[in-house]
Image (cartoon, rainbow, N blue to C red):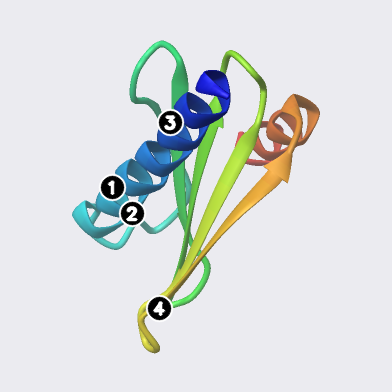
Amino acid sequence: MKKLIIMILICVNLALVAVLAFHATARPAEAQVRQVRGDYTLASARRDDDEDVVFVLDNNSGVLFGIWADTSRQNVEFVILGPRDLARDFAAAQR
């Protein structure tokens, strides 16, 4: 039970970090991938003038979290996208 609570807190923390990073970035023209900490990798991409996607990869568990934001409607969705191989596909597409 204690592990579950810690995992939920980590997920909420990741979501907040990604949302804050989304608001802090100035309109990236293409995907940007950078290390936030040794345990996490943050990537952001702009799909349209009003759609942004922020990805957070947990390097320990290999889970890729995605946050999609539509700034025109102020809508944000948080999605757990999948295992590490999906993250590798994403990273390979950005090179």
- The answer to whether residue 43 is left or right of residue 86 is left
Q: Residue at x 56, y 17 (%)?
A: 59
- The answer to whether residue 39 is left or right of residue 86 is left
Question: Looking at numbered disc 2 in the image, what kind of residue is underneath it?
Answer: Val
Question: Looking at numbered disc 1 in the image, what kind of residue is underneath it?
Answer: Ala
* Label 3 crowd (10 A; few <14 / some 14-19 / many >=20): few
Question: Looking at numbered disc 3 in the image, what kind of residue is underneath it?
Answer: Ile
Dot placed on the residue nearer the N-terminal end, 3 or 4: 3
Front position among marks 3 and 4 = 3
Labels 2 & 1 near each other (Cβ < 8 A)? yes
Dot placed on the residue nearer the N-terminal end, 4 or 1: 1
Labels 2 & 3 near each other (Cβ < 8 A)? no
Give the numbered dot on residue 10: 3
Dot placed on the residue nearer the N-terminal end, 3 or 1: 3
State the image coordinates of residue 83 (x, y, percent, origin top left).
Answer: 76, 31
Instruction: State the image quarter where residue 28 is shown.
Output: bottom left
Question: Looking at numbered disc 4 in the image, what kind of residue is underneath it?
Answer: Asp
Label 4 belongs to which residue?
49
